[in-house]
Image (cartoon, grey):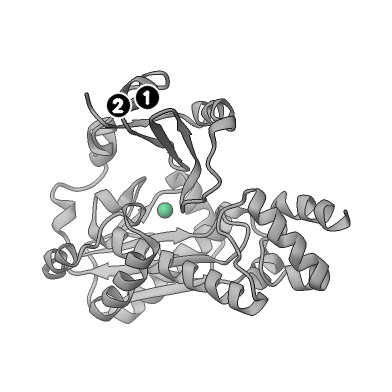
Amino acid sequence: MKQNQVIKVSNETLKKMAAAYEKNKLSKSVPYTLFTAKTGTTTITAYNSGKVMFQGTGAEKEAQKWGNPTTSAKTANPSKSQQLPPGFDQLSVIGSDEVGNGSYFGPVTVCAAYVEKNMISKLKALGVRDSKELTDDQIIKLSHLVKELIPYRLLILEPKKYNEIQPKYNAVHMKVALHNQAIYLLLKDLAPVKPEGILIDQFTPEGNYRKYVRSEKNQVTEKLYFITKGEQYHIAVAAASIICRAAFLEELQKESNELGYTVPSGAGAKSDQVASRVLKQGGMDLLSNYVKLHFANTGKAQKIAEK
Ligand code: MG
């Protein structure tokens, strides 16, 4: 019997699963996950991406309730890789990714990183891969190494600034602006060298991305490719993801140091609790330095603080 099963489900099913496992949920919060739960001998980890992992002796049976196992995104979505030129993973490419958009505390961080073809094997040997498979400590260590080896641009949108511009930009527009700017700056650094492609870990349909780019001052519109799970298609996306994930973790740590207690990532009940503590300490003025105020967590934290 297989001990591990991974399935890919729709948003709809993900919501149903979250409700079904409500009573079995574990309180630990793991980056990128919607929830983790344990039923009998099976541990269930549901990622925001729609990937759900079942581990333990009952994994196969439990997974079958929700969908069919997938071995990799490539076989699951054959049409997607066709958008990329053949041999894309061996080209000199800029990859770009972001972190923090779904976390109440902490910034949004975006990184564009350039991996020249002759660096690909070196990064692989270092252990650069999907940051979801790495621990926080590994991500921070790898980030330091990677930053010394390859050119990159990292943008950190701290909560204070985020809260200023958020009413004017929706979440997607904001991400587009950050990706576009990081890539633009990196292209300037690299000139006259030009990448063979620019791969953006897809978070919105291409048409939508291009629509928002049109309202930016510096527009990068050429050689762009969009694909979800971009880290599987070029290591530059994995490298970018590690750099911005590490920056996000470091910013959260900075927030924790300033406040004197640990601030969580994610947007669960723990975030409400900690935010209520910040509110009691310094009201909305203080809170606005640490969180994304438009999240529903703010209302919940206010209720807790009023008790
Ligand atoms: Mg991403």
| Tag 2: amino acid | Pro
- Residue 123: image location, x then y, percent: 19, 67
Q: Quadrant of the N terminus?
A: top left
Task: State yes or no: Cβ of the residue under disc 2 lies below 8 Å from any atom of ligand 1.
Answer: no
Is residue 137 rendered to the left or right of residue 234? Answer: right
- Residue 242: image location, x then y, percent: 35, 64
Residue 138 is labelled as none
Give the labeled residue for mark 2. Answer: 69
- Label 2 environment density (alpha carbons within 10 Å; few <14, some 14–19, many ≥20): some
Q: Residue at x 81, y 53 (%)?
A: 304
Mark 1 lies on a secondary structure that is helix
Q: Is residue 265 visible?
A: yes
- Residue 86: image location, x then y, percent: 14, 47
Is residue 73 rendered to the left or right of residue 207? Answer: left
Are the residues flagged by discs 2 and 1 in contact, CB closer than 8 Å? yes
Mark 2 lies on a secondary structure that is loop
Residue 63 is labelled as 1
Pick whichever, 303 or 129, lies toward us. 303
